[in-house]
Structure formats: structure tokens, C-alpha cells
Image: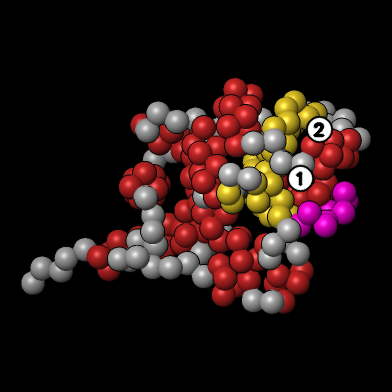
């Protein structure tokens, strides 16, 4: 039986939120458990409920979603967060994914497209518009090298070092006092920064980078 996903919707337009709620709840496996029209209410809902899915309006009266997105991914690392936007999503994709977001969807997208994105997340897949691929998403997504470590945080570097050593994900989670699911979320961010899609590729690129940074003694 498919697990029922709890959903929180954060949007400054109540009518839009209600319409989205009605669309989602046509599916028995989705249940909207909270709606908020501002950042503070939205963050509290996400922190308290730890929902499987958050739909977050990119442009709110308080500003754009990046600041709130970063807070949410720290407060509820297991939540998938989809950004809904009227702007050019391809330009936002890299920063949204790096901050822990799971996808971007145009507000003009159909209900079927929204459901396809959610179904993909259930299977661990990201859904992207075909025209993004045709319009050069690879250039937008190209990772930026910073001192050879691709902007990895200290925690991300520690996780990769332990993975290279062959330590299990469960043990790493225990070592840094987070959930096993949080390790998966960290790895998604690491893969994006390294420009890879598999564990083996991540290990290879990380190991190569750290070797290049190591001092050479004669």
C-alpha cells in the first residue's frame, strides 16, 4: 500500500492554496495537513509536522524562497520541497537544489505535471521540463570548483571522507547525530556540487580532488 504523504502548502494567495489542496487531495495518497500564507507560519508548520512534501511559493511578501528554504531543510531534512514559481525556473534550479529543494514547477503547470513530479519524488527521481534540457541546463548546473572541493561544507566533506573509507551510511548518521534519511539528503546536495549522479562517481571525483590537494613530499 502506498504511504500517505502529508503536505504543507505555503503561498501568499489563499485562493491558489485552496485550489492546489483540492487537486492534491483527489489522490488518496496525499493529505494536506497545513497551509500558511507567510514565512513564520509556514516554518512552524514544517517544523512541527515534518511533512513528506512542502509546496513553497518562490515569491512571497517577505522575499524570495531561498532564505526560508534553507531554514526548512535544516528543520525538516526528510521533507521534499517543491518551489512553485512564475519566474524562469531554469535560472533558479542550481541554487534551489543546493539549498535542499527537490524541484521547481511553474505555476502555469498542469495538475498532471504536478502529480508526475510528486510521483517521481516517491521513486527518488527528479522531473525537469524538456525545454530546460534543450536550452542549456547543463551549463546552468555546472558545478563551481572552490579550492578543489566544489563548495562542500565541512559536514559534507566529513561524510564523503567516511564513505571513501567504506563506512556505512547508518554509522555515519550516528557519528554526526542525524537521521539515516538526512544522510540521503546530504548526498543529494553533494552529488549536485560534484556534478555526479552515482555513489561510485562521487567517490571517484572526491578522492581525485583530495589527492590533488594533498601536499607532495620528495
Report which residue position mark 2 lands on: 30
Q: Is residue 57 above or below residue 3?
A: below
User: Callout 2 environment at 10 Å: few (<14), some (14 to 19), or many (20+)?
Assistant: many
Q: Is residue 70 above or below residue 32?
A: below
Query: Observer-nearest residue: 79 or 168?
Result: 79
Secondary structure state at the residue bearing disc 2: strand
| Disc marking residue 100 | none
Secondary structure state at the residue bearing disc 1: helix
User: Looking at the image, can residue 63 be seen?
Assistant: yes
User: Disc 1, disc 2: CB below 8 Å?
Assistant: yes
Q: Can you name the residue that lies furthest to the front here?
A: 61
On whether residue 59 falls in the magenta region, the answer is no
The residue depicted at 27 percent of the width and 68 percent of the height is 212
User: Looking at the image, can residue 201 be seen?
Assistant: no
Report which residue position mark 1 lands on: 118
Residue 77 in the image: state x and y as whole percent. 54, 36
Left/right placement of residue 2 relative to residue 92 reads right
Q: Which quarter of the figure is the N terminus placed in?
A: top right
Q: Which quarter of the figure is the C terminus placed in?
A: bottom left
The residue depicted at 40 percent of the width and 36 percent of the height is 172
Residue at mark 1 to residue at mark 2: CA–CA distance: 10 Å
On whether residue 107 falls in the magenta region, the answer is yes
The residue depicted at 65 percent of the width and 46 percent of the height is 60
In the image, the segment drawn in magenta is 106-113
Residue 148 in the image: state x and y as whole percent. 33, 66
Q: Is residue 138 above or below residue 34?
A: below
What colouring method underlies this structural image?
A: secondary structure
Amino acid at each position: 500500500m502506498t504511504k500517505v504523504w502529508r503536505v504543507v502548502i505555503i503561498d501568499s494567495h489563499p485562493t491558489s492554496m485552496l485550489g492546489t489542496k483540492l487537486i492534491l487531495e483527489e489522490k488518496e495518497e496525499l493529505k494536506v495537513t497545513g497551509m500558511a500564507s507567510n514565512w513564520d507560519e509556514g516554518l512552524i508548520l514544517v517544523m512541527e509536522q515534518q511533512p513528506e512534501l512542502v509546496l513553497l511559493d518562490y515569491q512571497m511578501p517577505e522575499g524570495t524562497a531561498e532564505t526560508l528554504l534553507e531554514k526548512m531543510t535544516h528543520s525538516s531534512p526528510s521533507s521534499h520541497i517543491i518551489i512553485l514559481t512564475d519566474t524562469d525556473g531554469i535560472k533558479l534550479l542550481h541554487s534551489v537544489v543546493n539549498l535542499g529543494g527537490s524541484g521547481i514547477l511553474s505555476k502555469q503547470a498542469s495538475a498532471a505535471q504536478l502529480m508526475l513530479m510528486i510521483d517521481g519524488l516517491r521513486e527518488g527521481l527528479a522531473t525537469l521540463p524538456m525545454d530546460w534540457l534543450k536550452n542549456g541546463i547543463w551549463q546552468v548546473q555546472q558545478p563551481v570548483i572552490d579550492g578543489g572541493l566544489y563548495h562542500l561544507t565541512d559536514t559534507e566533506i566529513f561524510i564523503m571522507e567516511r564513505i571513501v573509507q567504506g563506512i556505512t551510511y547508518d554509522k555515519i548518521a550516528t557519528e554526526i547525530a542525524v537521521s539515516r534519511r538526512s544522510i540521503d539528503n546530504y548526498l543529494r546536495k553533494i552529488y549536485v556540487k560534484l556534478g555526479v549522479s552515482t555513489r561510485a562517481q562521487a567517490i571517484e571525483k572526491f578522492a581525485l580532488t583530495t589527492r590533488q590537494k594533498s601536499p607532495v613530499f620528495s
